[in-house]
Amino acid sequence: MDLGIKGKRALVCASSKGLGRGCAEALAEAGVNLVMNARGAEALEAASAEIRAKYGVEVTTVAADITSDAGRQQVLEAAGQVDILVTNAGGPPPGMWSDWDREDFIKALDGNMLTPIALMKALLPGMMDRGWGRVVNITSQSVKAPIGVLGLSNSARAGLTGYVAGTSRQVAPKGVTINNMLPGIHATDRAIALDGGVATQKGISVEEAAAERAATIPVRRYGTAEEFGAMCAFLCSQHAGFVVGQNILLDGGAVNSTL
Ligand code: NAP
């Protein structure tokens, strides 16, 4: 399927690895020029070089912490005018509901709620002026079904979801759509790190911890960054102009709900 977005320009945050990288690859495959970001320059340069070589698109890189004011400013300056924004950042650490203080919440809100909001606030006006734009926020299945040890993530991402629900309806008349993608367990460094924590806690191997988690998913495996990226590219395509303010769950059926 021709996604109809060849030649567009996308800012894909936190995209040297994992789900962000999957989104960057799928957009590049559709002919979209990229601005890629991550904190670590080495992995970012390696990822951008591979994407340039494979898809022949322009790739600009900005090594910066997207959750800091200075980092965001650097990224936005380098990005300039973009048609597509994919927001992403690392997730907050796991723990117990009784562990977290105000500062922990402020950090989680900054990373997973206020950063995507600041990026949207900066880039939506240009998209609206030009009459076309796509925003996809990477959130989590924890928005639909809370994950006990990820209370910081449950809280911050729920806040972003509320903001998107209201804002997406206000920008839609100008040809701009905002939607969220909710990953369940995907085979990325983040998932492996979480498996490591479970393995230590239970005194089992990381492979055993991963097999236990996979067994809880109806498709009996982790998702892939490629599958995730393909959905992102579709939501950013010309074909998805009627999809507004939705929360798309990619979880292999793990969240057991009717709607
Ligand atoms: P990942 O494999 O650890 O990759 C994270 C990517 O983001 C890396 O490129 C990393 O590069 C970059 N990054 C992290 N923090 C950043 C920051 N502050 N500024 C700029 N770049 C940053 O993670 P993932 O599994 O793709 O997860 C992506 C998001 O989805 C996270 O918020 C995670 O909580 C959420 N999620 C993931 C899963 C899953 O199963 N994988 C499930 C639910 C939700 P640097 O470290 O070099 O910055």
Image: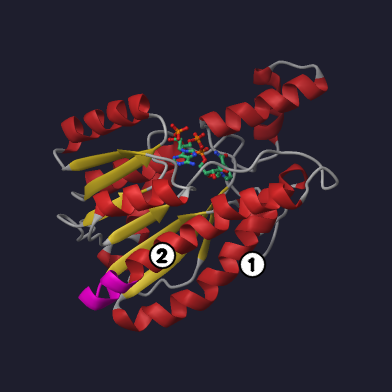
Q: Which SS class for mark 1?
A: loop
Q: Residues within 10 Å of mark 2 (few under 14, many from 20)?
A: many
Is 237 magenta? The answer is no
Q: Give the residue at x 53% y 73%.
A: 165
Asked if the residues shown at circle 2 and circle 1 are in contact, with their CB atoms under 8 angstroms apart, the answer is no
**Magenta-drawn segment:** 125-132
Q: Which mark is residue 176?
A: none
Residue that carries the numbered disc 1 in the rendered image: 259
Residue 53, position as x, y percentages in the image: 17, 30
Q: Nearer the viewer, residue 255 or 154?
A: 154
The amino acid type, in three-letter code, at marker 2 is Met
Residue 206, position as x, y percentages in the image: 67, 19
Q: Nearer the viewer, residue 224 or 132?
A: 132
Residue 10, position as x, y percentages in the image: 27, 53
Q: Is residue 70 above or below residue 51?
A: below
Apparent side of residue 11 relative to residue 139 in the rendered image (left or right) = left
Would you identify the image quadrant in which residue 172 lies? bottom left
Q: Give the residue at x 19% y 35%.
A: 52
Apparent side of residue 44 relative to residue 103 in the rendered image (left or right) = left
Residue that carries the numbered disc 2 in the rendered image: 120
Q: Tell which residue pokes out farthest to the right in this image.
A: 98
Classified by dominant secondary structure, the portion drawn in magenta counts as: helix
Q: Tell which residue pokes out farthest to the front in this image.
A: 70
- Which image quadrant: the N terminus? bottom left
Q: Residues within 10 Å of mark 1 (few under 14, many from 20)?
A: few
CB at mark 2 closer than 8 A to ligand 1? Answer: no
Colouring convention used in this rendered image of the protein: secondary structure
Foreground label between 2 and 1:
2
